[in-house]
């Protein structure tokens, strides 16, 4: 997440503060605080509604990352791609998944359904990890 998209930031001591990125004067800072207050309260309410402590949230994030890693290791992308290619046409030949995939396949597709499906799987895995592929 981009710093500008965040409601909060961290100061040098690591404490949470209102994100004042791009604020140039006191009036603008005051307006930002008034604007962000309802949003911050809403986010805090969502957090408190989970009933989880910060430590529990960190533990769950860690467990989630471990499970994703185990799943990725357990799935042989080539075998899955071969199965998809056997039953389905190349993904760029029917309603493209997104413009980036369409642009890639249209210019570089080698009529290799397996390779195209591997790209689709890799893209989805990256999205699940929160990476941009």
Image: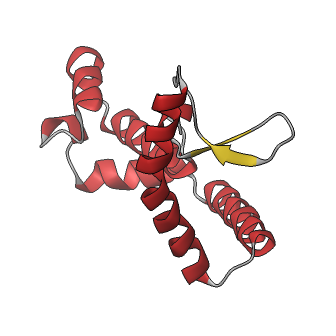
Q: How is the image coloured?
A: secondary structure
Position of residue 20 relative to residue 127, above or below, is above
54 vs 117, left or right, is right
Residue 133 appears anywhere in the view: no
Q: Residue furthest front?
A: 27
Marks counted in the figure total 0
Q: How far across and down, in percent of the image, does residue 28 sit? A: 46, 30
Residue 29 appears anywhere in the view: yes
What residue sits 12% from the left and 42% below the top?
94
Q: Residue furthest right?
A: 13
Position of residue 63 relative to residue 72, above or below, is below
What residue sits 31% from the left and 47% below the top?
85
Q: How far across and down, in percent of the image, does residue 16 sit? A: 72, 49
Q: Quadrant of residue 92?
A: top left
What residue sits 37% from the left and 55% below the top?
83
**Which one is in front, 68 or 27?**
27
72 vs 27, left or right, is right
Position of residue 39 relative to residue 100, above or below, is below
Q: How far across and down, in percent of the image, does residue 121 sit? A: 44, 46
**Which one is in front, 74 or 24?**
24
Q: Quadrant of residue 105?
A: top left
**Which one is in front, 83 or 105?**
105
Position of residue 54 relative to residue 98, above or below, is below
Q: How far across and down, in percent of the image, does residue 107 sit? A: 24, 14
38 vs 47, left or right, is left
């Amino acid at each position: 997440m981009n710093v500008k998209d965040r409601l909060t930031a961290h100061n040098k001591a690591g404490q949470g503060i209102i994100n004042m990125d791009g604020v140039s004067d006191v009036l603008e800072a005051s307006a930002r605080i008034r604007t962000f207050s309802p949003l911050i309260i809403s986010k805090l309410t969502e957090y408190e509604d989970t009933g989880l402590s910060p430590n529990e949230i960190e533990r769950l994030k860690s467990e989630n990352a471990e499970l994703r890693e185990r799943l990725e290791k357990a799935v042989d992308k080539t075998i899955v791609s071969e199965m998809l290619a056997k039953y389905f046409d190349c993904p760029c030949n029917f309603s493209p998944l997104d413009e980036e995939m369409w642009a890639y396949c249209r210019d570089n597709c080698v009529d290799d359904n397996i390779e195209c499906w591997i790209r689709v799987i890799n893209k989805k895995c990256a999205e699940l990890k929160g990476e941009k592929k």
